[in-house]
Image (spheres, rainbow, N blue to C red):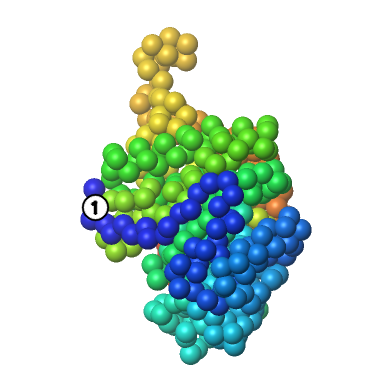
Amino acid sequence: MNPFVFQAPTKHVFGEGVVDGVGAELAASGWRKVLLVYGQGSAVRSGLIDRVRSSLAEAGVEAVELAGVRPNPEVGLVREGIAAARAAQADAVLAVGGGSVIDTAKAIAFGAPYDGDVWDFFSGKAAIGECLPIAVVLTIPGAGSEGSSSCVISNDELGAKTSAAGDAFRPRVAFMDPALTCTLPPYQTAAGVTDMIAHICERFFSGAGDVPVTDQIACGLVRSLVGEAPRVMEDPNDLDARANIMWAGTLAHNDIAGCGRALNPGGRAGGWESHALEHALSALDTRITHGAGLAVVMPAWMRHVWRADPGRFLLFGREVFGIEPITEEDMEFTGPVDEETTVEWAVEATIDELSAFFQSLGMPATLGELGIAEGDIDGLADAVIASKGGPFGAFATLTRDDAAAIYRSAL
């Protein structure tokens, strides 16, 4: 186990009806004026925003509102939010929504005290320091942003989508009511589950050796998601399954599944190769849902790199799907097979099983289903390298040609 620093300061208020306590909780923290950030309509149509407004008003907390956050949130609205927070002299930011809304709120929170342009934090020109406190009402599990130290924002003008990291902007409190997720469309639910599994896998396949305790946490989370997701697909109102998925999404990305697996003790485990490959996709076409892109590129990445450490894939296959290399007894039916071949079969079966699970939820299997064609490959590979700054990867180093080959294999 490598040295690590684990910090998870977010207070999670979990359970049906917790939204109605938002105002009292924020007032108890001493916040009197918040910037309320939400999306493009569903939170309003469902009556959730009215519930939040009422709770804030009853507790004497004033709210200034910023609506209209889109999927794959864009820096332009972040800049509007920064201006609004400054004008109102807001002492906190309250996000009501999923990862896109929360990431927008995070960027506003660390951009408001900064004298320069907020994109400086995403282009590497500035380090995050002072930050307004952030609270969250989670409506879409998946991104894990309600408890994470990461924030992803797009810049349409530059055709870029990149991340910033820092414990300063981990939310102070997250209100998590699984009942709010029962009306999510199946596609959005499936994309969220895929994103959760990707967060776990990015850490599990991190280039570090075995870390038994952390590895079992990771595999247990994936096993739980594989079991719970079909339940909500069959019955969207299965509140227990919704609750388990919501909590798994938080644990998938608050770093507990990576403890001891980071190559740098102060950093996050993994090279986040699949996320880099997907971010280029949804920067090219902002209509591509992040989880849907991951459902395609992560298995393709796995097929490209597994030979760097077959043992990690064998462990994942055994613990998550019960897949083992064939034995001498099995060879009675297959004929003599060398060990290298048995390992290859087991690893490929594991990747096939993961991909099939994503597809069983309604996720795409190919880039073609997302509207990506051969002519897009070179630009996507260039975008990945521009974002990562050259050859990248923790499990296996990837060049521009590797990125292009992974995309091409997924067409």
Residue at screen point 60% across, 76% down: 62
x, y (%) of residue 96? 61, 62
Residue 290, by quadrant, is: bottom right
Is 146 left or right of 327, judged from the image as shown? right
x, y (%) of residue 101? 60, 65
How many numbered circles are shown?
Answer: 1
Q: Which residue is mark 1?
A: 2
Pick the front one: 160 or 199: 199
Q: Which amino acid, by three-letter code, is at mark 1?
A: Asn
Pick the front one: 269 or 271: 269
Residue at screen point 49% across, 74% down: 31
Task: State whether residue 75 appears in this view.
Answer: no
Pick the front one: 335 or 7: 7
Give the farthest residue toward the right: 45
x, y (%) of residue 207? 34, 50
| 302 to 227, vertically: above or below | below
Residue at screen point 40% across, 25% down: 325
| 153 to 174, vertically: above or below | below
Pick the front one: 279 or 97: 97
| 217 to 143, vertically: above or below | above
x, y (%) of residue 358? 60, 39
Q: Secondary structure at mark 1?
A: loop
- Mark 1, other Cα within 10 Å: few <14 / some 14–19 / many ≥20: some
Residue at screen point 28% across, 43% down: 211
Residue 318, by quadrant, is: top left
Task: State whether residue 50 appears in this view.
Answer: yes
